[in-house]
Structures are given as C-alpha cells and as structure tokens.
Amino acid sequence: MNEAQPDELAAATEVVLQLRWSDQDALGHVNNARIVTLMEEARIRWTREDGNTGRFEFGTVVASIQIDYLRPMYYQPEMVIRMGISRIGNKSFTVRGIGYQNGQPVFDSTTVMVPLAGDGVSSRSLNELERDWLGASQIPARS
C-alpha cells in the first residue's frame, strides 16, 4: 500500500485528538476498536467545525468502514487524523482518514457516509452546497 505524502494531503483537515488512558490495551497499544471511535470523533468535529449542528441538515449515517493498520499506535497524550474526501457519489461520499503518531502514519481508513432525508431513515442525493464543501476537501483515494 502506498502511504500518502503530505503534499498530496494539502486539502486535508487536521484534527488533533487527545487519547484516554482507557484507549490502551494491556500492551500499551491503542485498542483497534478505539480507533473507530477516534475516527468518529474527528469526523464529527470536522463536519461541525463552524460551530453549527452540522453541514448536513438531517445528518449522515455510516454505510461502510475500512481500516488498514500500518503500525502499532501507542498510548500517549495525543494523535492527529488528517481527513479529506476521496470520493463524491450521488447519494454517498467517502471520507479518508489517516492517523498519525509522532509524524508517522499508523492507520489509513475510508468511511462511506450517506446523507439522510427528512424522515431520518431514507437516503437522499447530495445537494450542490454539500458537493461544493466536499469538493473543496478532496484528497487522493487509497491505492
């Protein structure tokens, strides 16, 4: 797998997250399930960075998550996730998140998100405002 170089991630948003003591396992590694929670926290902060309730009026749901663990991630005060959009479809988009610790990538993930319609259950097409915002954050897809 090719690791993204910093210049390829120029449109990425960097989110700094504090790790909790309870995130680690008996070996001092951050538990793999906790990484999913950290990705969720970064995604929510990113979509609500302007202080509003979110960029999607009725919210979004996760349709799929894939994570490649590149090296062990150890418990320490903080870590960074660089996030951007690697694909924009009609009724979904893919968020790519690359976790870094001590300047080294520790995981590379993709999360397919689906915007909800007003009924809170059905999917809907992305509108132009959403497409523009997502397009401004496009980064390369994982290879």
Image (spheres, grey):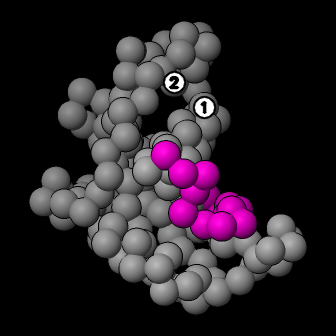
Q: CA distance from mark 1 to mark 2?
A: 7 Å
Q: Is residue 105 above or below residue 31?
A: below
Horizontal arrangement in the rendering, residue 116 relative to residue 32 (left or right): right
Q: Is residue 49 above or below residue 54?
A: above
Amino acid type at image mark 1: Arg
Of the pair 106 and 137, the residue shown nearer to us: 137
- Main SS of residues in magenta: loop
Q: Which portion, as a residue range, is magenta?
A: 51-65
In the displayed image of the protein, which residue is found farthest to the left? 7
Amino acid type at image mark 2: Val
Of the pair 105 and 12, the residue shown nearer to us: 12
Q: Which residue is mark 1?
A: 34
Say which residue appears at 61% left-offset and 37% top-offset: 37
Asked whether residue 36 is drawn in magenta, I would say no
Q: Is residue 129 above or below residue 23?
A: below
Asked whether residue 61 is drawn in magenta, I would say yes
Residue 9, x across and y down, in percent: 23, 59
Judging from the image, what secondary structure is the residue with disc 1 in? helix
Circle 2: is it few (<14), some (14-19), or many (20+) Cα within 10 Å?
many
Residue 70, x across and y down, in percent: 38, 43
Of the pair 50 and 73, the residue shown nearer to us: 50
Residue 17, x across and y down, in percent: 42, 30
Say which residue appears at 86% left-offset and 73% top-offset: 119
Horizontal arrangement in the rendering, residue 111 relative to residue 124 (left or right): left
Say which residue appears at 51% left-offset and 24% top-offset: 30
The reply to whether discs 1 and 2 touch (Cβ–Cβ < 8 Å) is yes
Quadrant of the rendering where the C terminus is positioned: bottom left
Horizontal arrangement in the rendering, residue 75 relative to residue 124 (left or right): left
Horizontal arrangement in the rendering, residue 89 relative to residue 81 (left or right): right
Q: Which residue is mark 2?
A: 30
Q: Quadrant of residue 75?
A: top left
